[in-house]
Amino acid sequence: MSNTASPGPIILTNNKSGEVALWVTFVIFFLSPLFFILVGLQVHTRKRSFHYINATIAIISALNYYKMASGGGWKLVSQGDKLVNGEVHEIFRQVYYEHYVNWSMCTPLTIFQTAILSGMSWKDVAIFVLATEGLIQTGWVGALEENVTNKFVWWGFSILFLIWVVYSMLWIGGQAVKLQHYRVNWLYIVVVGGGAALMIAYPVLFLLGEGFGVVSVGTEQIIYSILDILARVPLGFLLIYVNEFTGDNFHLDLLPESLTELRSSAKRGPVYLEGQEQV
């Protein structure tokens, strides 16, 4: 009987630079809601929809990034056996599933804002948002899948959703926004130009990192952090100043009066319980 021990597994984990990136991103998202809220207080309550949404996105992102930066939100996932220095080792990679928790909540909200800016129909808005959720959920399954073939099948499913998301951005939204003022049209072009590029960058990084293992875990966290910041903070800035950028020619973000007024306001008249005498 041979006493030769089999080679141990190789575990790929985050490095110092990746950890710093998570903390820096947490701080940026922690401070961003304060800015969005303070700016929102300067405008009419019916014009605060983008302020509310972007503050919510930043708060959720801050909480998710704090969990990752403080050492949570990850799982070791097997990437199969690989030949390293003449020996076969099982490779395990640290996968931060908390990113997918974050994206599943924040990315649909971001997409919803883009759809509102375009002026597309509510039917197209719903499909746009649901396709985005499909993109994230299939990517999430793929990230935690240990069977290599299944992993790339799930990645392929996410790409199908991505194609519809980009199509909705560029074509459906692009056609709808042409019916608005030209300054709104130009703002939308800026938003979707950057947005489409970022949406494509995410699955490419997934392929290079969690797929083929070409990109290290630390580098992956740095790039994901940069992508998340670019996808949320600049977009939020553009949208909360939509009046300034469009010369007050955009009005599709107006909240209904019924949502911003007190339900017991004088406009609605006194409220009586059933059987109560009305004065």
Image: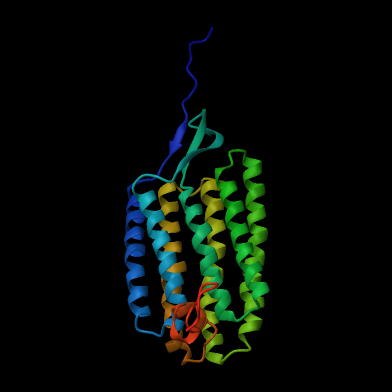
Residue 199 is left or right of residue 35, and the answer is: right
189 lies above or below 71:
below
Q: Tell me if 20 is positioned left or right of 197 in this view.
A: left
Using the rendered image of the protein, determine whether residue 255 is visible from the camera's viewpoint: no
Above-or-below relation of 207 to 36:
above
Residue in the image at 56% along x and 57% along y:
204
Instruction: Say above or below: 266 vs 200.
Output: below
* Residue at the image position 51 percent from the left and 53 percent from the top: 100
Where residue 142 appears, as percent x and y from the top left, is: 59, 47
Where, quadrant-wise, is the N terminus in this rendering? top right
For this rendering, which residue is in front, 270 or 116? 270
Q: Residue 265's x, y, as percent?
A: 44, 82
Q: Position of residue 39 (x, y in %)?
A: 35, 79
Q: Position of residue 276 (x, y in %)?
A: 51, 74
User: To which quarter of the image does residue 82 belong?
Assistant: top right
The answer to whether 150 appears left or right of 22 in the picture is right
Residue 145 visible in the displayed image: yes
Up-down relation of residue 266 to residue 81 (above or below): below
Question: Which residue is depicted at the point 45% across and 52% down?
Answer: 220
Residue 95 or residue 204, whichever sits in front? 95
User: Which residue of the protein is positioned furthest toward the top in this rendering?
Assistant: 1
Numbered label tally:
0
Q: How was this image coloured?
A: rainbow
Residue at point 35%, 55% (across, down): 21
Q: Nearer the viewer, residue 82 or 30?
A: 30
